Every structure is written in C-alpha cells, then in structure tokens.
Amino acid sequence: MNSIIRLMGNLLFIFLLFAALFSYAMFQGGFTSWFLFFGFLPIFLYQVALLFYPLRHWKVKRHLQREAVKAGGNVSVTITVERGLPFPLFYCVFEEVFSEGLHRKDDGKRKYRHMDRPGHYNMDREVKRAVFPSFRRRIEVSYQLEALPRGVHQLEGVTIRCGDLFGLARKEVFIPLEDQLLVYPAQDDVRLTGSWSSLDEGGKASSWTWHHTNIAVGAREYAPGDKISSIDWKQTARKNEVMTKEFEQEEGMDVLLVLDSCWHQGMNPLAFEATVELAASLVRAMRRQSIRTRLLIVGGESVYIPGHGEEQMAVAQRQLARIQPSRSGPFVLKLREEIFRVKEGNVVLLITSHVDRAWLEAIQPMKTRSKYMVVLFVQASTWISEEERDLLTQMEMEGMEVIPMTESELVQTPVEVRGK
C-alpha cells in the first residue's frame, strides 16, 4: 500500500512539473522556453520508465563466508544481483534488515570491563552500501559483519532503493532473503585450581587437575593445555602429528555442570553471557582433563547432554549458542523438573548470575543428592547486593563451595576458577 502511494505521489509530481514546463512554453513561446521543454522531455520519459521498472524481478542472492562463527568474530557477506534488462540506473542503495539479536556487539573479553553497564554494548547495527550500476546486469555488494554477539541470528532481507540523478523519482523494494547465522559462545582458556575437599566420605582432598591416569585407553590430537607428560610419542611418530593419551576414568567420578538460564527481574545481560561462555569453556577444559562431564541447561526448554564425546561436545556448543534467558518459569520450578538428573556420587557445578532465598531452598535437594556442590556466582561487583552476599556466606556455611566471578576474574587470560 505504501509503495503504491509513493508511486502515485512521484508520478503526480513529475506530471505537474511536465505540465508547468509545457504551459510555460505555450504561453511564453520562443526558442528558450521550447528548448527547456524538449530538453526536459527525455528526463521526463526516463523518470516515468524508472518508476515502472520492476525491481522485484531482480534475482538477489546472499553469500556468507561462513554460517557459524564464535562470539566476537567477523563474517564477510556478499550480495549478488542479476537483472535481465540493462536499464540504466544512476545509483542503488542496498540496506540489510537484521533480527533484533544483531543490534548488539561483542568485543570479546573487553566487554566485561563494562559489566556493570550492559547497555554499553547495544548498538543500531546498520549496513548500507551505495553502488552506481549504470547498464551493468550483474551487481555485487560486499560488507563485513563485525563483533558478532552469541546467538542464532536471522538476516531477513535486503531493501533496495534506486533513483534518478535529480532525485525527482525514487523507487524502493524489500526483497525477502533469509539466511541464518549461528554464533557460538567464546571459549576462554580456563585454569581449574585449588583443592576441593569432601569429595568422599572420608574427606579425601582432590583437585580440579584430576586426570585419573589409571590405564591409557586411546589417543587423540594434542590440544593447548594438555600436559606434556601425556603425549603419546609412538602415535605421534606414526601419524606425524602430536597425539595425547586418553585415560580410563576412575569409577564414580562424574561432574554434572548445571547452567541457570532462567530470566529474573533486574537481570544483567552481560552477566548471563558470562555464565554461558564460562559453561562452554568449562565443558572444553574438563574434557581435556578427561573428567567425565554432563551438561544440564535449566530454562524454558531444559536440555540435558549426558556425555562429553565429540558428538556430545558439538551438541553442547550448539545448545549454548542458542539459549536465551527464558521467561517460561522461575529456576525454582524448572529445577524441580530436572532434579532426577542428579545421581549419588555426582560432583555438581552450578553456574548462575542470580541467587535469592527461594533459589537457595531449591538447590538443597540437589546438594543432598550430590557428593559435592560448587556454585559459580557470576555478577558485576557493583551489582552484588547485601542479601546476595549473605546468601553466598550461608551456602559456604552449609558446606557448598562458592566462587564469585566478577569482571576482575573474567577479563584475565586464562580465566582462573580458584577453589578454596
């Protein structure tokens, strides 16, 4: 409807201008007036032809350099237009239409310096490119999407605007062109340090640097952070690439990593992003240390990933890329539905950006069922209330390991998760 109104308005303006020049030539007479009239006639005909030129018949394609990238990364995009009729065009402006999630930016660990100001990273992402196609049948426009935030983002379409040299005739059309861009959470190097006591009835001390090196059962490619002593030199020489031994794990040692992805009043979006990135980094770090790890995401559609093999790791990363704070229900209710996931002998590692009295009461059954519980509380230091500090202290008194993770820890490389 708007396009029809715009077309009729442009046509009316051009015909009024044509009528004014014709009237001037008729009443004034003489060479000058008729020269102006006939000199404008080709421009008049071109403008009318431009207004009826069918932009919707253009074949528009978008090519993404890659459809998956890590948060903070860049993607090159190329828009290609092919048109059959080489109608002369003075200029074309191409504008991308993005989903809401792309109106934020992610500049890696630097974003946590402003963790107390999450709105600092909102932006009006706009991509406009002007070209001068003239008679060309094929038009290419390239640009780069930078500082991409985590999530599943939709590139919904392209708006094309064309016009004449004098700006008297303008034409605009929206071409639906859907593409999906998957942005995985950034994975930082994580150093798991400190002794974590009370893992067994007898109070046996242990550490997050466990390898449980009982029996070597296989080999895999070397990854940064693997111990030099674990390198399998025979396999390295045979395959001509560095290989690391994989060891049989000690019976009963099982870590359940729980991520709180439920929405709450006054939520800090940057703190939530930090919990997701920390979960992704811990899953990778524990796999490198051959710690058997299961992942439970508690939210609108809770997700449980029972293993840490290659396939399960890929599923975990995809789920962590997709999740957003869920408003379908509080953490208290969602956890009750998933409490059966906690088995006797589990070490539970719970990551959250929010605690309150109801939250603390909800995790009590989980603590009772598990062998040991660690709570990673992620929040900007200035956002932590006195009530939350009191609750964290109470958790420690009840035998839980509480590790606050603020901006000062999150900006470090590697990120250090330090136990008591």
Image (cartoon, grey):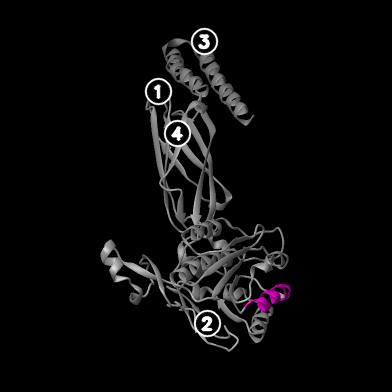
Is disc 3 in contact with disc 2, using a CB cutoff of under 8 Å?
no
In space, the residues marked 2 and 4 are separated at their CA atoms by 59 Å
- Which secondary structure type mostly characterizes the magenta part of the structure? helix
Mark 3, other Cα within 10 Å: few <14 / some 14–19 / many ≥20: few
Task: Look at the image and tell me whether residue 282 can be seen.
Answer: yes
Residue assigned mark 1: 86
Q: Nearer the viewer, residue 320 or 292?
A: 292
Percent coordinates x, y for residue 231 in the rendering = 33, 72
The three-letter code of the residue at mark 1 reads Pro
Sequence-wise, which precedes: disc 3 or disc 1? 3
Q: Split into 4 quadrants, where in the image is the N terminus?
A: top right
- Magenta-drawn stretch contains 362: yes
In space, the residues marked 2 and 1 are separated at their CA atoms by 69 Å
Is 224 situated above or below 42? below
Which region is colored magenta? 358-370
Residue assigned mark 4: 92
Q: Quadrant of residue 274?
A: bottom right
Residue assigned mark 2: 419
The three-letter code of the residue at mark 4 reads Cys
Residue that appears at 68% across and 68% down = 339
Kindly report which numbered mark, 3 or 2, lies closer to the viewer in this rendering. Answer: 2
Mark 4, other Cα within 10 Å: few <14 / some 14–19 / many ≥20: many
Q: Nearer the viewer, residue 253 or 222?
A: 253
Using the image, tell me which numbered label, if any, was put on residue 26.
Answer: 3
Position of residue 226 in the picture relative to residue 308 (left or right)? left
In space, the residues marked 4 and 1 are separated at their CA atoms by 14 Å
In space, the residues marked 3 and 1 are separated at their CA atoms by 36 Å
